[in-house]
Amino acid sequence: MRQYWPDPKPERITYDQWNSQFRMMPESQKKAFCYLEGTSKETQYLEEPRCFAEDQGDLRLKSLKYDNSLASIRLWSFLLSEEERLHKARLAGKKIIGTLKDLGTMPVLTYSSPDTIAFYPDGAWWIPCIMEMSEGLLKMADSLGLGEEVCPSRATLSAYISNNHFPRPDYLIAAVGCCCDDFSAIMQRLADMGTKTSWWELPFRGSPSAGEEVELLPTGFYAPKRTADFLEREFDRVRNELSEFLGHPVTDDMVSEGIEKANRFRQIIGEVRDLCYGSAPCPFPALETQICEMIAIHFCSDREEATNVLAHVLETVRKRVESGAGVLPKENCRAVWVNPVADLRVMNLFEDLGGAIAGTEYLFRHALVQIPTNVSPMRALALTALSDPMIGPAWQRAKIVIDEVKKYKAEGIVVSNIPGASHSATEGNIIRELASKEGIPVLQISVPPLTDATSSQLGTRFEAFFELIRSRRKQKWQPTPLA
Amino acid sequence: MKEVFQNPIFIDALEARQSAKNAIKYACSWVPRELLESFGLKTARLMGCGTPSHESAGERKLSGEVCSFCKTIAGASLSGAPVIGCTSCDQMRRLSEIILSEKYETGFMVNVPKTCTDNSRELYRSEIRALYSHLESLTGKSLTDESFNTKLKNVCDKRNLIRSKLRSLRKSLSAVDFHCLVHLESQTDPDFMMSYLEKPFKTKTSLKKKTMLAGSPLALEDAAFLKLLEDSGFNIIFNATCTGDRSIDFDLSIKDDPITDLADSYFNHPPCIWKRPNDSFYSYVSKKLLETGATSVIWRSVRYCDLWNIEAQRAKQIINLPMLVLDMNYSDTCSPRTATRVEAFRESLPQ
């Protein structure tokens, strides 16, 4: 096993503390981690956080709190160096594939070819937060006709056009069908930019009719077999188009190997989630666990190193749980968090005021489940894509959330709405309705890309929610089992 | 605007919508209503009242960030009649889902593909077949092949005839009358509509600026908006909304395999803006602009209708004609603000 610099006592630290700690680290340790390993562009990526804030303009880093482990610094450095990694990957001769919307499945197919890197330009929705609006992406989106009524993913179009935040992909693979209207319109605008685009249909996962042949999905839901058949053909079509673009076939064997590697990653993230969300005191903060989960969607543009990073996190978390150490007080109120937040600082605020994450549903549960290995690879990808919580009835997503509450013995649910997102407009109420039948308290909030102006309002709402949870503890409240 | 609400066709359409409360509702023009009618069901398109009060009633049920058109549907009281939902746009899908959650046994969701490939055509066919099975269990009718073929052909022939008649009347009708007729057609059975179209209709007289209207669906009450446009000097020569010419600009061709033929006819019918890629929509619109001689476009989306709203800037570049972009809720329909913008646009066009 690799030897790491010993971690200090687990705690959440400020940006300045984080920088000081980094400077104390031995040089040998700083040089220990590389991405694009084995290529001509192999690069060490562990950096002082100040570098990202000052050089890249990631100003939000200055007002966040971080886990103080080496695994956390590595995780953050890996995340924040993605843009540079994409540029270097191109220089190393890799083709860059921009996958859009499906959040998790298409990258498994694209990474199956050794000469490709896949990433989601959708991730640009966090840039306005990370750079504290200094980059002007939302202003630019306004000028492109995408105002505040559109969700923060509108930053994707501006980032793509400005060409300042990620290299323009060589090829786009865009999922439409059961897709938010705003992002569908954004994808149409991206396709105009001259990049070759393959569109594929992500169908609605309707409830099967009585007597209809069904397929069991990795998330435990059922889909009509005909829908799975259709999606399998879609994956096959995209695979052929990708092969044609790459100039060599992407074979079943290559995809099977890709699935095996993705499953290895997903197994690790599964263990990290179980340990983080199922333990008190909480061994790893909300912000870092959210990043771990986000990496699952496209491996942060380097599948092999992403797996190493996550394995390092797992090792750290495991040690902490074994020794009963944590980063938050044991009595913090445990809640399942629904939807990723546009402003990362909200996760800090939640913990500062007495919360602890005990389960999540960040829109991409299908990127966390094991991909079936007992069917053909295209079928396996189809079944996994069909597990997407966003393409089925909202009550099914609500059920995933309730199951998460039961699995990790959470005491409440926080539904963090994304302003302008069409799913947020209706889903929150459905989750609330199902949760109330189970006697689970729900807090619905709306989180814009920067919450500085509303943090005291959000804080008051968190405090009231925790008060409610604590009062229920006195009544020895437990969720009632589903009928 | 008062005279719009005294327009006899408007009144008939309004009454038809009210008396269609118990009809089986279909959420969008991508649900083949002829299939429902071949089972002997009375059909009506799911429509709300395009008024601020219904919009705010819907907002109370859903949320502020849902499109105004869907809000008006949610704001209306629905009877216990079955609903056939549709995934045509995300807002309609989510609204359908909420409505269907109260109609577990009777409702059905049609999955409408956004792509135009052989595979997505096959998906749509399978959806229509599943809808057929659903209707069999809903009505308890198991139609033999021959009787089904005959009934479906009969219904399709009648609807084709109605669409054809509407198309032929189109040029002579005012935009308001045509709009009300399309709404009336969406709420009534074919026999009623065929006899209704035998009536003489008032012909429009004045020569005005030929304009195309495109955008989100229009509620019946949006007749007032069309009246405002006409009074401001516009001749809405083509209404490219799914509640206008686009909804009647196709025929159904039923031959040997009725379900497949019906599905294919609908799959090929004039595309909506949400097709990906949506080149086919623009090809269709360009063709219509040439045919009709329209020299300007009014692009009207309802608030929070992302599909039409976000597309406006792109549409301006592709269509390359003077364009007025309006983003409205139902309080804006005839507001002074809208009137001023419409008049200013009219003034800006060459005489």
Image (tube, rainbow, N blue to C red):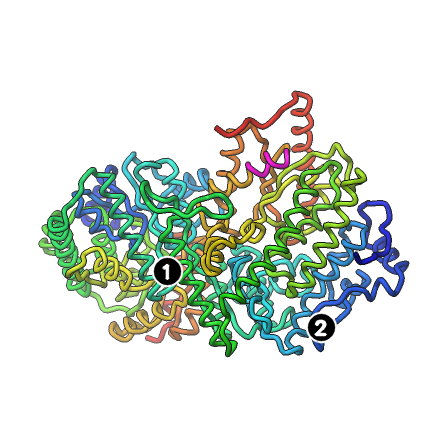
| Vertical comparison of A30 with A388: above or below | below
Residue B334 visible, this orientation: no
Q: Are marks 1 and 2 on the same chain?
A: no
* Circle 1 Cα neighbour tier, 10 Å, few/some/many (<14 / 14–19 / ≥20): many
Q: Is residue B254 left or right of residue B115?
A: left
Residue drawn at (50%, 43%), measured in percent from left and top? A397
Pinpoint residue A365: horizontal percent, then vertical percent.
55, 49
Q: Is residue A406 left or right of residue A61?
A: left
Q: Which residues are magenta?
A: A403-409
Q: Nearer the viewer, residue A293 or A110?
A: A110
Q: Nearer the viewer, residue A208 or A271?
A: A271
Which residue does the numbered mark 1 point to in the structure image?
B215
B268 falls in the magenta region:
no
How many marks the image carries: the answer is: 2
- Quarter assignment of residue A210: top left
Residue drawn at (45%, 69%), measured in percent from left and top? B314
Which residue does the numbered mark 2 point to in the structure image?
A38
Could you tell me which secondary element the residue under label 1 belongs to?
strand
Pinpoint residue A131: horizontal percent, then vertical percent.
70, 61
Residue A61's tag is none
| Vertical comparison of A472 with B117: above or below | above
Q: Which residue type does callout 2 highlight?
A: Gly
Could you tell me which secondary element the residue under label 2 belongs to?
loop
Residue drawn at (58%, 45%), measured in percent from left and top? A361
Q: Is residue A274 left or right of residue A417?
A: right
Pinpoint residue A189: horizontal percent, then vertical percent.
48, 68
Residue A456 visible, this orientation: yes
Residue drawn at (43%, 52%), measured in percent from left and top? B90
Pinpoint residue A47: horizontal percent, then vertical percent.
80, 64
Q: Residue furthest top?
A: A475
